[in-house]
Image: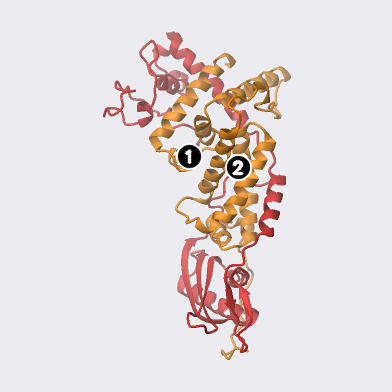
Chain colours: A red, B orange
Amino acid sequence: MALEDAGAVSPNPERPQDAGTPGSTGPADPARLVGDERLPCGRLVSEAWDQARTHADRRDPHMAGCPHCRQAAEGLVALDRATRVLRDERPSARMVADRVIEAVRAETRLGRLLPLDDCERDLRVAETSAAKVLRRAADTVPGVRAASCRLFPDEHGGTAVDIVMTLASTLDRPLPARGAQVRRAVAYAAQRQLGLAARRIDLKFVSVLETGRRPAAGRPVGTSGP
Amino acid sequence: MADCPPLPDPTDGEGDRTDPPDADLPDSVLSARAAEGDDDAFAILVRRHSRSLLALAYRLLGNVPDAEEALQDALVNAWRRLPDFRGDATFRTWMYRIVTNRCLTVLRSRAPSVPLDAVPEAAAHDAGGQPARAAESAAATEALAQALARLRPDQRACWILRELHGLSYEEIAQVVGMSETTVRGRLFRARRTLTKEMASWR
């Protein structure tokens, strides 16, 4: 578990003699060089902590008799116990999340305005809105989800628009076939739903979605909910 | 109207879809969308991370109203700064950084000494087991919360990120903008102070 401290709980603690002397080349763990403290008995505080988290049978006999080490260890045990309780004290964030989402929707960015493929050449669509429609089109291809979607108007003032998308995909089918499907879906939406004259559609697969189960990558445990 | 040839409906022949709904998309996909102004994607990220982030702000600042205000400021600020988010850190680390910085700014602007009874709030948690043990455990937790509030803000931030949120040294270094070695030093000092304060609660 990540909450265990590799710095202070190394399973096989060395006895660095130079702890606290910056620049010395002895111990491998920099934690020992950064402020570790020597107890009156000669042991390091971090060693007493290591021992406190070690199973009783494997403990250094010194621990049992040394009041300094015992005191350091007992403090750590009490701290660990209270820390576990504190970790679960998490106020509900629902209200603040609601307020943030409301504030953000109120200042929605439009992005640049792009020409629609219309003979009068005076109709425009906001990049942000168009990108949403095109991402949704790419998402209709099974196993594919659109990430970024940028649109670039023709530099010479024409109505043509280039589309650049990045995609996340499962790997259960060959990507070229998927790419072709996405291209068709995006071209269709650009023309039929938006009325954009899509010229180039550049697609880049940039990340992998897990197949079978829901992609939970990057999702920390227990952050949703009330 | 455009004179492109008509296109086949691309959804033809696609059977049952088992793709996850947007709410289950990875942070990387959602943050790329949000960076381009997709407020729906940002809303999902906010719902996904706000509870952890509020817990972080609450522990750093010591009370819920200040924590909520700091989190709200930080998240709206994040929305505005998302176009600059390049994905060299994970979205989560980036958010932790924005919230931590916001809280440290609040702490710096506070009066140098806040009355002790104002920081932090009494622990509110459901302790199980025997009432006497629960009361003792609640008192120990309260003692830890108080001791934490007395730590220097930089040490407090490192300790909270490590012990309450499980971030790695490398991630903490990114969040607080210090070297990993400095982070280890801060953590050692924080843990040393807290173990001393907690020694009577064994």
Q: Kindly identify which chain the residue marked by label 1 belongs to.
A: B
Mark 1 or mark 2, earlier in chain: 2
Q: Quadrant of residue A190?
A: bottom right
Secondary structure of residue under mark 1: helix
Q: Residue at x 44, y 53 (%)?
A: B88
Q: Is residue B169 above or below residue A75?
A: below
Residue B10 seen in the current view: no
Residue A198 percent coordinates (x, y): 54, 81
Identify the image quadrant of the N terminus of chain B. Answer: bottom right
Residue A20 percent coordinates (x, y): 34, 23
Mark 1 lies on residue: B176
Comparing A68 with B91, the one in front is: B91
Q: Residue at x 55, y 47 (%)?
A: B95
Q: Residue at x 65, y 50 (%)?
A: B47
Most extreme residue toward the left is A25
Residue A173 percent coordinates (x, y): 49, 69
Comparing B50 with B81, the one in front is: B81
Mark 2 lies on residue: B53
| Gap in angstroms between the C-alphas marked 1 and 2 | 15 Å
Q: Residue at x 43, y 9 (%)?
A: A66
Residue A23 falls left or right of residue B40: left
Residue A82 falls left or right of residue A68: right
Q: Kindly identify which chain the residue marked by label 2 belongs to.
A: B
